[in-house]
Amino acid sequence: MNQSRIDLPTHLLTQLSPWRNAAAWRIAFSGGLDSTVLLHLLASLSKHHALPTLSALHVHHGLQAAADAWPEHCRSVCEVLGVPLQLVSVQVRPGASIERAARDARYGAFVAAIHDNEVLLTAQHRDDQAETLLFRLLRGAGVRGLSAMPRQRPLGLGHLLRPLLDVSRAELEAYATQQGLSWVEDPSNDDQRFSRNYLRQRVFPVLAEQWPQASMSLARSAAHMSEAQGLLDDLARLDLAGATAPGAFDWLGVPSLELAPLQALSPARQRNALSHWLAPMTTLPDSDHWSGWNSLRDAADDAQPIWRLAGGELHRGGGRAWWLSDHWLRSATGPVEWADPAAPLYLPDNGWVTLSGKRPAGPLCVRYRQGGEVLELPGRGHRDLKRLLNERAVPTFVRGRLPLLFRGEQLLAVANLAGLNAGADGSWQLIWQPGSQDRGLS
């Protein structure tokens, strides 16, 4: 790209042309150079082009005294440009990496603010992309990580776009100077204890002495990696297609995969397919922690291995791998008295149960398996519940959550299991609607 001839307004309009029908464009506005240029460009373009409604969003982290003046600066800039501004204050959780914690808090605010079919525009540029690639390379990232920042991705109910990834910081600064713009400087950007600052201030100047186009080349490599990751995603979808056949317990609403088709793949393709499947639900493990998958995959059929990840757990049962998160990782609490069997009964951390048909006489109560329960079946007499669950290959993680309908000490039915969930005369059924999992955001 010839930096001296780039036309920033035209370039930006071209990048955003596929998104002209969005409900609104929201600009993540920190008050710094990059987002100030993006905001000014969009406000200027909106005077001559039919664009979606513009507004700005400033997230105040409250991490340093200097930042307390930034909301007022952002407000004054937006007033001059005629762009509405939303201010959001967040709490940054303490942790090992304040950079990561601040980012998590910021993106949490973005997700909450973006409505259906809206677009959030952020101002990361080519130098940021190069820093991200080098930073992740030094951390030993794979192809997915070395793809660096995507140009677009889903965000909450809308999308996040980075339309300036082909533009250098020098070009943004030249535009800001030409337009007489003012912006805030973050004092923390001078703190070389932060990895990105160290790369920006110490490493990249040395690289540029020998390779003046280093940032451009690294950003181009990130684009190549992104293309390679796209091909790996295509392969993952093909491999997962053979592992997503319907199962007998799909009604649980728990994501699962058949193990046999995965076990037939090479280890590398297994990891690729699982990474693709897990990515929307959890932070992916680094290479040192994939041994947990090997243990789960190779365990004996009667074993109960668990692979614990950041966002949940992978369990094995019935020839499938099951992803458990949210309330599935907490114990269901009971018993729960069913005072009005004509109405659905809420089960803490375990969804709802209803009775259809002619309801059995009460008093009724929902309990959970403790061991030793016996159910009377027409033509079979009294049968041990554990054996009945084994006959139906009920996954182990479900057994302690299956609602059991009792009248006094008599077990009447087991929810949702054919042949066990109804009265002896078939005049009523016990129906369980498990609570849905919060699959999280990546």
Image: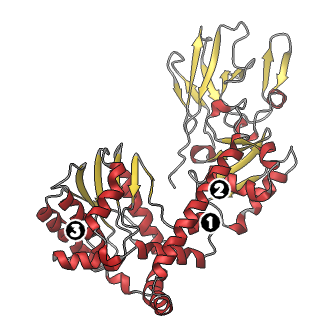
Q: How is the image coloured?
A: secondary structure
For residue 425, which quarter of the picture?
top right
Q: Quadrant of the N terminus?
A: bottom left
Q: Residue 11 placed where, x, y %?
A: 32, 63
Q: Which residue is mark 3?
A: 71
Q: Secondary structure at mark 3?
A: helix
Percent position of residue 319, x then y: 80, 40
Q: Residue furthest left?
A: 80
Instruction: Tell me if label 2 and label 1 are in contact, CB under 8 Å.
Output: yes
The disc, 2 or 1, on the residue closer to the chain's N-terminal end is 1
Residue at the spot x=66%, y=36% of the render? 401
On residue 232, the disc is 2
Amino acid at dot 3: Pro
**Rendered image quadrant of residue 39:** bottom left
Callout 1: helix, strand or loop? helix
Neighbourhood count class around disc 3 (C-alpha, 10 Å): few under 14, some 14–19, many 20 upward: many
For label 1, the residue is 143
Query: Dot 1, how many residues are within 10 Å of its Cα: few (below 14), some (14-19), or many (20+)?
Result: some
Q: Is residue 402 above or below residue 426?
A: below
Amino acid type at mark 2:
Leu
Amino acid type for the residue under numbered disc 1: Val
Say which of marks 3 and 2 sits in front. 2
**Considering depth in this image, is 68 or 177 the residue closer to the camera?**
177
Quarter of image, res 367: top right
